[in-house]
Image (tube, grey):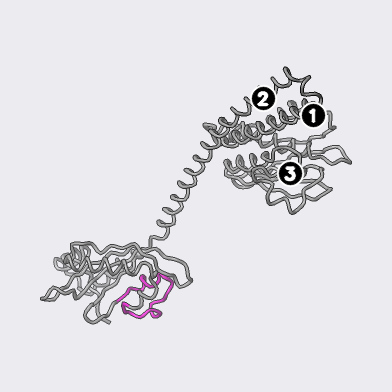
Amino acid sequence: MKKLLVHNEIDESLKQYFKDSTQNTSDYEVILSNILEGTMAGFWDWHIKDNYEYMSPTFKKMFGYEDHEIENHPDSWQKIIHPEDLPGVFDVFNKHVASKGKFPYDNEVRYYHKDGSIVWVFCRGKVIEWDEEGNPLRMIGSHIDITKIKEAEQTKKINIALEQKNQELERFAYVASHDLQEPLQSLQIFTDLLKEEFALELGKQGVQYIEYIDASRKKMSGLIKSLLDYSLIGSEDKKTITNVQVIVDQLTFENKELIEETNTKISYDNLPVLIAFDLQLKLVFHNLILNSIFFRSKNRSPKINIDAVKKDNYWTFKITDNGGGIGKDHIDRIFLLFQKLRHENSGAGIGLAFCKKIVELHQGKIWLESEVGIGTSVFFTIKV
């Protein structure tokens, strides 16, 4: 094996040190080798004329291979480099040679790891020996694994793109909601005028048709308002100290008439105080509690129990009811926008989508377990 002599500032500094000291030059080579190996950067030394290329054990280890598993030859790395990146490597090399080294030999390329995964590498090299005719004779360089950096960059780009898309959707929903409300308001005005001024001419059936139109208008208006509210989730400026016990106390008081009318029993105790978006967390409990009341069993009065358990950095809430339950074929889609729950004519189908978006805003997740005829348990987590 040809001896590796790296021509760089470290090399020159060490040479000067050993020249001015009484140290043995063999110590110099040991120190240099340990410096290079200790960086965990792969290095290579290509003797171009002989077409021999020394590749360090760390170079090979970067791609999951032991030293003996890869031959010290240019073909070896060309076999594991991503085929889309190989032409770019040759192009940079040709420019580097044509400029006599002034054009830098720098590459960010992908290699295949032994296990099939992708390893991103930053490669920097330099021709250090030329013949009398200006042809390259020897080139040295290093490889550094930058996979984590590239993955972080990619994740950042995805997050930025998602954030931009979310902002666009929110702006669209806000503008659309306002623009769509205007013709509905006009529709209300004219249907009211028809009933007031032409009720006799229209007759009982005609008035009934107008009432159908007005009912549809109100339903459409409610859907648009729900869409607007959904787009505004996350617009609260900051989280505050939130007492969940107080939130549920308030909700039971605000819905006292419905609770008494349906003979609903709600049990809860020692719910936590945490940092959260107070109004939006209240909306989660509002939707889940009212769902349990609205979708109650026909054969028994509603019973709702609310529990909370802290584990690691999350509070897990559980809201259990004894309602009619949800079929397994509906569970996967009920957290989507405008997916109605349990009964085709009930609500706008947006309440649970609200809950999902708010929970995810708190870096948590939401799911449920249900059995038809027995009841439903909704779980959600809030990061603390």
31 falls in the magenta region:
no
Question: Which image quadrant: the N terminus?
Answer: bottom left
65 falls in the magenta region:
yes
**Marking on residue 258:** 1
- State the extent of the magenta-drawn residues as a range: 54-74
Report the amino acid beneath label 2. Gln
> Label 2 to label 1, Cα distance in Å?
29 Å
Residue at the front extreme, as displayed: 201
Going from the N terminus, do you reach mark 2 or mark 1 first? 2
SS for dot 2: helix
Going from the N terminus, do you reach mark 2 or mark 3 first? 2
Question: Which image quadrant: the C terminus?
Answer: top right
Report the amino acid beneath label 1. Leu
- Residue at 28%, 77% in the rendered image: 53
Q: In this view, does 312 lie to the left or right of 20?
A: right
Q: Which of 287 and 337 is in front in this view?
A: 337
Q: Position of residue 32 (x, y in %)?
A: 26, 68
Q: Where is residue 134 in the image (x, y as percent from the top left)?
A: 13, 73
- Residue at 23%, 72% in the rendered image: 139
Q: Is residue 313 left or right of residue 161?
A: right
| Residue wearing tag 3 | 341
Q: In this view, does 170 lie to the left or right of 90?
A: right
Residue at the top extreme, as displayed: 197
Height in image: 33 above or below 190? below
| Residue wearing tag 2 | 188
Any part of residue 273 in sight: no
Report the amino acid beneath label 3. Leu
